[in-house]
Amino acid sequence: MNKPHDPKADNQAKTLYGSDIIADALREQDFPYICLNPGASYRGLHDSLVNYLGNETPQIITCMHEEHAVGIAQGYAKVTDKALAVAVHSNVGLMHASMGIFNAWCDRIPMVVIGATGPIDAAKRRPWIEWIHTTTDQAEIVRGYTKWDDQPGSPEAAVETIRRGTQLANTRPMGPVYLTMDVSIQEQELTERPQFDPIEKFRTPENPEPPAGALEAAIDILAKAERPFIFCGRSSRCEKAWAERIELAEILNARTCAHMKLPAGFPTTHPAFIGETGWRLKGKVLEAIENADAVLMLDWLDAGNALKLAFPQGKPRPPVITVSNDFQIHRGWNMDYGGLPAVDVNIPTVPETAVTRLLEGLRPLRKKPAPAAKRVWKATAPAKSGPIGLMDLAHAFSLASEGRKITITGRPLGWPTNANVIEHPFDFLGHTGGGGLGAGPSIAVGAALGLREIGSDRLTVAILGDGDYTMGLTSIWNAATEKLPLLFLVANNHSYYNDEEHQIKVAHKRARPEENAPIGQRMQGPEPDLGALARGLGLEAPEPVTDLADLPAALEQALDRVAAGAAVVLDVRVKQEYIHAPMQEFD
C-alpha cells in the first residue's frame, strides 16, 4: 500500500514528535500491519507511520469501517495466535469498532487497539469538532469487554502503555486492549530521544504449569478410566498441541467432541471423534458423554451449562476434570463466561500445557493402541436439478474441496454439523465469538492475511449467510487491495432467517399464523445483487447459482480461481431453512 519514497532515515536530523516515539513503540512489537479507518484524532500518529516509519512494520491497511479494521485483526490472530494493531478515531471511531471488539473479547482473541482523543487540555481544543471528539474516560465505552485500557500522559508513558498492552493482549486467556493517545502527546515536540529498556525485557510470559496435586489427581482418574470423554474446546493453532490432543485421546481410548463455534479442536476423520456440537448436547455426542466414566474438559465454552445439560441434578455423574484459566478475565459487565462448572479436579492453565503434562504421566501407565484407520468421509453429489438446500450445498462443497488445502473461516447459522473434513488446526477457525452479524467478511480477510504472513499456501473460504455478507460488505474490498486469494461463499436465502425461526416458535406458542414469520425479515423488493456489489469493490463474481445442476461446476470454478490468486464472491441461492441434523453420523 502506497509506500513513500523517503522514510525514516531522512527524518533523523529533523524535529522529533511524540507520535514518532509511539510509532517506534508499535514497530518494536513487530506488527506487520495496522488496520485503520483514517481519523483526525490520530493525525500525528498517521503522519509518523507514513513519513517517519515509511509505512513499513507496521504497514497501513486502509479500511472502509472501524468494525472491519477490528475484524481483520481478529481473523489475523485466529491464524497467528498473535495480536495485530488497529487504530480507531476518537469516541466515534471507537463506537463503530465496539461490536468488533466485543467479538474479539468473546473469542478470546488478542489485539492492540490504539484509540485517540481530542486534547484533554481544553485550552488546546479546536472549536466544536475537538470538543465533540473529546471524551472523559473514553475507554469506559469498551472497558467491560477488554483486558486492559490506559491513557498515557506523555510520549514516554505511551511506550510503556504499548509494551504492557501488547504483553497483556498476548497472554492467555487472550483478549483486546484499548490504548488512548491524546492528540497533544502525539503532536508534542521533543528536544531529545527518550531512552528505554530493550524490548526483549518485556516478552509475553509463559503459560503456567499445572499444580502438582491437581495434575496427580487427574492422572489417577484418567489412568483408571475405561470410557473417558474429552471436550476439545479453546486451543491454539499449534500443530504440536494438535498432535498431543490426538495422542491423549488414543492413549485413553477416549471419545471426543469439538464445539461448532470454536476453531478446530480435533480431527473429524479420527475414529475417536463423535461429532461437533453447540450448546445443545444431543444424539450420539450426548450418549457418549452419558456413558463416560471420566470427563476431561479442555477449556470448553460454557463448561458449567454443558455439565448441567449432560448430568442434571440427581443423575449419576462421573468424575470431571477441567483445564482452563479463563476465569482470570471473567468480568461483571457481560456473562460470556457461562455457567460455573461443578468439577472434581480443576487445572488452572491452558489445555496445551496440561495435555503435555498429562501425557507424561499417562504414557507409562497406559499402552497406546495401534493406529486406527481414518473414517471414510461420505459426501454425495446433489440431485441433477432443482432448488438448493443447505445440506445440498454442504455436500457439494465437501466434494469440490476434496484434495485442496482449505481454511474455513466461518460457517452460517443452520449449517449442518459434521459437514466439513477437519484434519489440521487451520482447517476451521470457528465463529465470530460474540455473534456479531457482519463480522464474517472482515474476519475472512484477516485470516487470509495471516495465512499469507506465515507463508501458507492454503485457500481461504468464508461460508457466509447473506445477512452477514451484506452487513460486512465493504470489508471485502481489502481482499482486493491486499490481493488475497479468498472465496466468499454466500448461502443466500434473502432473509435474516434466524429470526424467522424465532417468529415461527412464537406464533406456535401464541396460536398465531406462522405464515407471517417472514414479514420484516426478508431482503426483497428488490433483492440485493450480491455479485454486482462485489464486482464494484474489485472482486470477481460469477452469476448467481440457482439450480443444483450448476452447483458442482460453479464451486470447482470458484475454487480454481482462488487457487490462481483471485478474490471471488459466489452467490448461491438456497432455501429458507436451517439444518438441525448432522451431515455425517459417527459411532
Image (cartoon, rainbow, N blue to C red):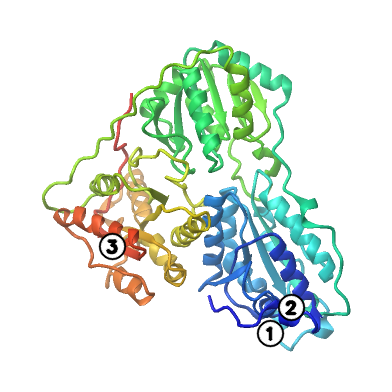
Indicate whether 151 appears above or below 209: below
- How crowded is the residue under tag 3: few (<14 C-alpha within 10 Å), some, or many (20+)? many
Q: Earlier in the sequence, mark 2 or mark 3?
A: 2
Residue beneath disc 1: 129
Using residue 370 as the reference point, say whether residue 513 is left or right of it.
left
Q: Nearer the viewer, residue 76 or 129?
A: 76
In the rendered image, residue 469, in percent from the top left (x then y), is placed at: 39, 63
Q: Earlier in the sequence, mark 1 or mark 2?
A: 2
Q: Which mark is residue 207?
A: none
**Furthest-left residue in this view:** 384
Between marks 1 and 3, how big is the CA–CA gap?
42 Å
Label 1 vs label 3, nearer the camera: 3
In the rendered image, residue 134, in percent from the top left (x then y), is placed at: 73, 76
Q: Nearer the viewer, residue 552 or 583?
A: 552
Q: Nearer the viewer, residue 333 or 44?
A: 44
Label 1 vs label 2, nearer the camera: 2
The amino acid type of the residue labelled 2 equals Gly
Indicate whether 355 appears above or below 512: above
The amino acid type of the residue labelled 1 equals Ile
- How crowded is the residue under tag 1: few (<14 C-alpha within 10 Å), some, or many (20+)? few
Residue beneath disc 3: 571
Q: Are marks 1 and 3 in contact (CB under 8 Å)?
A: no
In the rendered image, residue 109, in percent from the top left (x then y), is placed at: 59, 51
Between marks 2 and 3, how big is the CA–CA gap?
43 Å
Element marked by disc 2: loop
Residue beneath disc 2: 118
**Is residue 493 at all visible to an observer of this figure?**
no
- Residue at left 53%, top 27%? 307
Element marked by disc 3: strand
Q: Are marks 1 and 2 in contact (CB under 8 Å)?
A: yes
The amino acid type of the residue labelled 3 equals Asp
* Quarter of the figure that contains the C terminus: top left
